Image: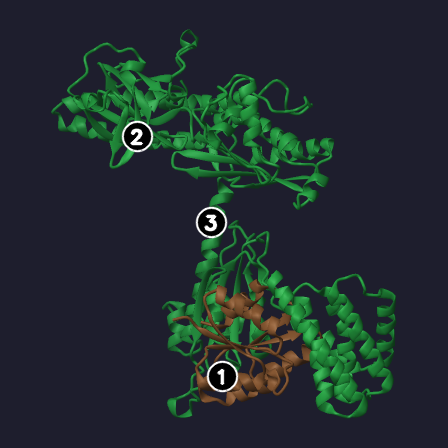
Chain colours: A green, B brown
Amino acid sequence: MDVQRQAFKEEAYELLAELETSLLELEETPDDMEQIGRVFRAMHTIKGSGAMFGFEDIADFTHNVETVFDQVRGGSIRVTRELVNLTLSARDHIKDLLDEGGGADEIKANGIIVSLRNLLVQDDADEEAEAEALPEIVHAEPAVPGPVVTCRIRFRPAPDIFASGTNPLLLLNELREMGECSVTAHTEDIPPLKDLDPEACYIFWDIILTTSHGTNAIKDVFIFVLDDCELTIDIVDDGERVVDGAHPDRLGEILVRRGDLSDKHLQKALESQDRLGEILIKEKTASRAAVVSALAEQEQVKKRIAQRKETAVSTSIRVPADKLDQLVDLVGELVTVQARLSEKAATETDADLVAIAEEVEMLTGGLRDNAMSIRMLQIGTTFSNFKRLVRDLSGELGKKIELTTTGGDTELDKTVIERLKDPLVHIIRNSIDHGIESPDVRKAAGKPETGTIHLKAQHSGANVLIEISDNGKGIDAEVIRQKATEKGIIPIDADLSEREVLNLIFSPGFSTASKVTDLSGRGVGMDVVKNSIEALRGSIELVSRKGEGTTITLKLPLTLAIIDGLLVTIGGDYFVLPLASVDECVELPRNRDEKRNGRNILNVRGEIVPFIRLRKEYGIQVDRPELEHVVIMETNGKRVGFVVDHVIGGHQTVIKNLGSAFKKARDISGATILGDGTVALIIDVNKILDF
Amino acid sequence: MAKTILTADDSASMRQMVTFTLKGAGYEVVEAVDGKDGLSMISQSKVDMIITDLNMPNMDGIEMIRNVRTMPQYKFIPIILLTTESQDGKKKEGKAAGATGWITKPFKPEQLLAVVKKVLK
């Protein structure tokens, strides 16, 4: 832009020089229309381009001179010596403004403006023109989408629309980008070929549009042709009508309301047995296009109402929570018994038994999914609880903070949501306390005074991602590194990536708060947050840019009670790995170790993957089989292999707690009972990697 | 093939800004210093769209639009008129002369591109 500002200045200096010459000549020949036009254009260009390139003061001032010369041009003001003098001093003032040296005298400038205005001839027509000012393209993307409404738009361009270079199809395309849209073209006005003017537009359109942009945005699409077309926009569904007794309007009703069909014709048609639309077309009482368009409207509104009906019904029964817990327990037992049945049936030859076992397996799967889904709650309620927290705490600290949320309709297991609340409070408090700066600091950094904390929830496979982001000052990796070194968490010469350094704040005993406040720094650090998230079999990840803000992402399983697991064996014992994080399984030949000098690294299609021998991890002494398997899992964005003896396959895993006796078994998150009664341990992948 | 747009403006800085914005968005741009210059340029080589200033020496924007519309190959191309706020009457006059739409100065590059996208296929 600086180059363009410079270009404007050069141009303006040139124009001012020309202006001087023109004015002096004008003094000699006051009626020279060409010179008058030249002065007007010079002022006009300086004003127009000045505003474009950020010289608003010049544009505002020059506007006054331009207005006068517009009237001179129109013949209502005559060129006098006084006018030339005034314009010359105006020219000098513009030059002073351009110099930006502070030489511009504002008092003198006001004097010039007043004198110029006194010259103006009051013209009523001018005011009138202003009153019916034409609309402008403001390129407004609505910041907050409004309610979703369905509109019927009838767009009938004037026959000569093409003469202004307008392509109506582009306008229709623009509408299509705004939401679900069906367009029907009315071709009934097209005359026989001999009467047809190939340059005229005979077609008009009915458009049914479901959009959140609002009717003003729809009008904006037609901004250039508003005077050259008939445009009607009617809201046919305001997004609130729910099914209680209401049905989408019938075809006949729509046609009559639009005026495409008379009530009498409708009644007559209804008495016959054929489909209404077909009759109307056959009898030529309504055109085919009109019927097709009305049907499209009916279809689209019907769909919207059906969607709302679904959401309206889903909140209708209240059940005590412990009944649900019991239900899930029972389903868990049932799943275990069903596994036994399936196993038994697999060894039997009785076809009936096998069929029954298969059916029970299918039904149990359905029952399990259903029971789980009953326990699902929307996270939105939890999100909105934080609004108050943010409001109160930010007030206490004298900060301006706004909490925004998206994905509040994302569902999570009730238990997960309950146990998620404390960690979320802690993270949000940290953001308020350390993340968002005070209004004056933000202003100085060129940010809006009000900081934003954004909560976002979304599904990702068998997990839910919850993102807490703020646009505060971010975390300085260098400060973290220093602090961690001071506290002996990392050695002084530790070679860590920025991401690893940032994630040190989850280490026990780490706190960067320079003073203890009511909010955070209560002796509970981010390590506790991390532990609570991991207790939910989730993971936590932090990304931060200094000066721009911090984003913490929590990855949580959808449910805690039953998971899809991958059953494996090591030395005759059974283990379960969470299937959601399993990427793939590959084989590991026994003689491999000699080739790699015992390094635990695997080449998977060109990618280097480190692996861990679970056999070693759990001290299993039994001999290794000829061919081992590596289960490659993705966790915290990294791929790590786990070496097992055999991979058996997918397993519906009902999670049982190990009980307090096994509290110290940190890398086992629970156990499950297999079909034959054997116990399989569920491996906590994140914990193993921590050690 | 990239679409070619003619920009007619007597202000060099305005031409520069329009050209810079349009080229950045992948359009070809030819520049003319006034209406007359614009007419002679488009009769030599074909353009797909015209963006013209209103007030120019020799031939102003509205007269240029009238002339363009008499040329058979340019009867239906989009033409955008650049005006200032004080000239609402001129917008109507421009529209009557055959302009497709208008942009009011001062405008941002994004607004210019939004309008071009709106009228040019």
As drawn, which residue projects farthest toward the left? A349
Q: Residue at x 48, y 80 (%)?
A: B77
Q: Secondary structure at mark 2?
A: strand
Q: Secondary structure at mark 1?
A: helix
Query: Could you say which disc has been placed on residue A481 in the image?
Result: none
Query: Could you say which disc has been placed on residue A307 in the image?
Result: 3
Query: In this picture, is A530 found above or below B38?
Result: above
What residue is disc 1 on?
B41
The amino acid marked with disc number 3 is Gln
Q: Quadrant of residue A626?
A: top left
The amino acid marked with disc number 1 is Met
Q: Position of residue B21 (x, y in %)?
A: 53, 66
Nearer-the-camera pick, A113 or A18: A18
Query: In this picture, is A364 found above or below A238?
Result: above
Nearer-the-camera pick, A23 or A569: A23
Q: CA distance from mark 2 to mark 1?
A: 64 Å
What residue is disc 2 on?
A609
Nearer-the-camera pick, A282 or A196: A196
Q: Chain of mark 3?
A: A
The number of numbered discs placed on residues in the rendered structure image is: 3
Report the quarter where the N terminus of chain B lies.
bottom left
Q: Residue at x 68, y 76 (%)?
A: A14
Q: CA distance from mark 3 to mark 1?
A: 57 Å
Q: Secondary structure at mark 3?
A: helix
The amino acid marked with disc number 2 is Val
Q: Is residue A35 left or right of residue A464?
A: right
**Residue under disc 3 on the same chain as residue under disc 1:** no
Q: Chain of mark 1?
A: B
Q: Position of residue A119 (x, y in %)?
A: 85, 81
Query: In this picture, is A386 found above or below A12?
Result: above
Q: Residues within 10 Å of mark 3 (few under 14, many from 20)?
A: few
